[in-house]
Amino acid sequence: MSALTIRRLLVDLDTPMPRHWAGDAFSTAFFNALSMSFPAGEQLFIDSIRKGMAHLSPEQRAGFAEEVQGFIGQEATHRRIHQRFNDHLVEQGLVNSWELRILSRRPLVESIDVRNWVAVTAATEHLTAIFSEHLLHHPKVLSGASPHLRDMWLWHCSEETEHRSTAFEIYSALGGAHAWRCQIFRLVTRSFALDLTRQTLRNLWVDGTWWRPSTWVQGWRLLFGAKGLVSSSRQAWRRYLREDFHPDQADGTASQAWLREHAALVPPVRATA
């Protein structure tokens, strides 16, 4: 079990942001799409962990209590911050169709075995951790971004790295099988990639930049270049399929370093230990 600190984020999210705040059209559309999924998605994760905890023994719940409190606190803060960010996207005329899809799927997710619901959370948390580690190790991705929004994303990435084990460990404590974990991970990967692609394309369409060749050059560099997100993440993705996998096997030093170096920007609300 790990102690998780619940933090505030001291950045200005009231001032309207530039339309291409990430430095170019494709990166902005891509990051905006991710943010659009977070408020509804983070709530789904919180609810799955609460449901999973309810199915554990009293002894198991006691062992997880502090970590889960921190997990829920961090995710609730992410949800609130990204809702404020998304409010600016609405003002810019962007349409969040991804959130509607998440909400429409919620009854189906709630109807499945609780272990599988937690497995969906664990799978998505691993995908988020892969993205977070990439961004923390390749800060040039956001080198052209508005500084306060770059800080917002790196804070989120750092905390995602911190709590990447929580859902996985609860799934294991519930007796979840390795084969089902892998099957659900593949399904979540396909669904996540499709939803992210659809929302990014829609954002570019509204932005009026989808037809520019430079937009697709930017996208290729971000995703498939020598140090692109997809190019650099294949091995990390495959690790989840190993029977001896555990999220803590990944290197968390970049997350720890960012949080330490920016302690004044992200002061604790409270710590779980």
Image (spheres, rainbow, N blue to C red):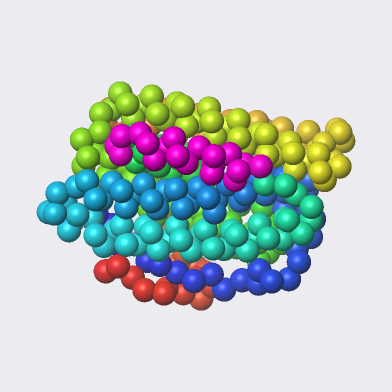
Residue drawn at x 32%, y 26% as measured from the top left: 180
Residue at position x 68%, y 64% in the image: 147
Q: Quarter of the image for the N terminus: give it.
A: bottom left
Is residue 213 rendered to the left or right of residue 2? right
Q: Quadrant of residue 171?
A: top left
Say which quadrant the C terminus sits in.
bottom left
| x and y percentages locating residue 93 in the rendered image | 79, 52
Q: Left or right of 119: which side holds 10?
A: right
Q: Residue at x 71, y 32 (%)?
A: 220
Q: Is residue 175 covered in magenta?
A: no
Q: Position of residue 215 (x, y in %)?
A: 81, 38
Name the residue at the left extreme: 59
> What span is in magenta?
97-115
Front position in the image: 109 or 165: 109
Q: How many marks?
A: 0
Where 219 sits versus 24, above or below? above
Q: Position of residue 35 (x, y in %)?
A: 61, 51
Evaluate whether residue 142 shows in this view. yes
